[in-house]
Amino acid sequence: MIDLSRKCFIVLICITSALAVDLQYSEIVTVNNETRYIVLNPDAALTLFNKNHYVGGQYVFTSGKRITGDRLILNFQDSTQFTKGEDVEALLRYPAKGTDTNIITQVDIYAAVSSEDADSFFVDGGINKSFCEILIAGNKTSYVEFEMFIYGY
Ligand SMILES: *[C@@H]1O[C@H](CO)[C@@H](O)[C@H](O)[C@H]1NC(C)=O
Ligand SMILES: *[C@@H]1O[C@H](CO)[C@@H](O)[C@H](O)[C@H]1NC(C)=O
Ligand SMILES: *[C@@H]1O[C@H](CO)[C@@H](O)[C@H](O)[C@H]1NC(C)=O
């Protein structure tokens, strides 16, 4: 009973923080060869983020370049665990609808996964645009933890 109310509480916090940012978010979902993004969207033009690997399955995916006068316009994080290695994806669109008044300069995604087969991509919009849609993907990972920072002016 205590455990259940705790779970509800955690879910509420997640919903509240998801609403606080102007983001359309798929959640972290498991995919297979029939349901992964590139299979469902074969015509999408993917722009790969730079990938830097740090110790212990920690990655930083970066695209773009900060400029003088830009600022953090969106910060979002999520995490999940699986009982076995899964192929996973998360799709995020900023802003949730249409375009924003901000021009995006840089996006950083700090991620922790238990697999080396992980990448981030723009699938629409991106650097120097006023919207972006980002795909984070990883194969055979038993956990995913990420925090995304979008900078712009
Ligand atoms: C999925 O596709 C990959 C390569 O495209 C292949 O190695 C793997 O066996 C496939 N998995 C299934 C379950 O069909
Ligand atoms: C994951 O596996 C799929 C199917 O084999 C492959 O197309 C994709 O490049 C792999 N890596 C990522 C990060 O999705
Ligand atoms: C964004 O704009 C800057 C300044 O004009 C330019 O240097 C950079 O190459 C552009 N980047 C992309 C990905 O369009």
Image: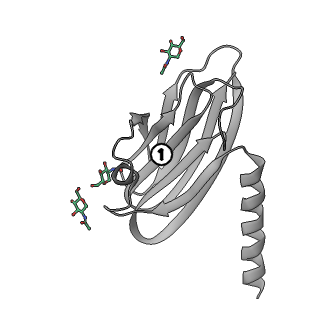
The residue drawn where x is 53% and y is 30% is 126
Q: Is residue 8 above or below residue 69?
A: below
Q: Residue furthest bottom?
A: 1
Q: In this view, does 54 lie above or below 117?
A: above
Task: Say which of 132 and 137 sits in front.
Answer: 132
User: In the image, what residue type sits under mark 1?
Assistant: Leu
Q: Where is residue 107 in the image (x, y as percent from the top left)?
A: 56, 32
The residue drawn where x is 69% and y is 38% is 74
Q: Check disc 1 and report the residue beneath it.
A: 135
Query: Mark 1 Cα within 10 Å, few/some/many (few <14, many 20+)?
Result: many
Screen quadrant of the C terminus? top right
Q: Where is residue 85 in the image (x, y as percent from the top left)?
A: 38, 67
Screen quadrant of the N terminus? bottom right
Q: Which residue lies furthest to the top in this view?
A: 68
Left or right placement of residue 15 versus residue 85 in this view: right
Q: Identify the colour scheme used.
A: one colour
Helix or strand or loop: what does disc 1 sit on? strand
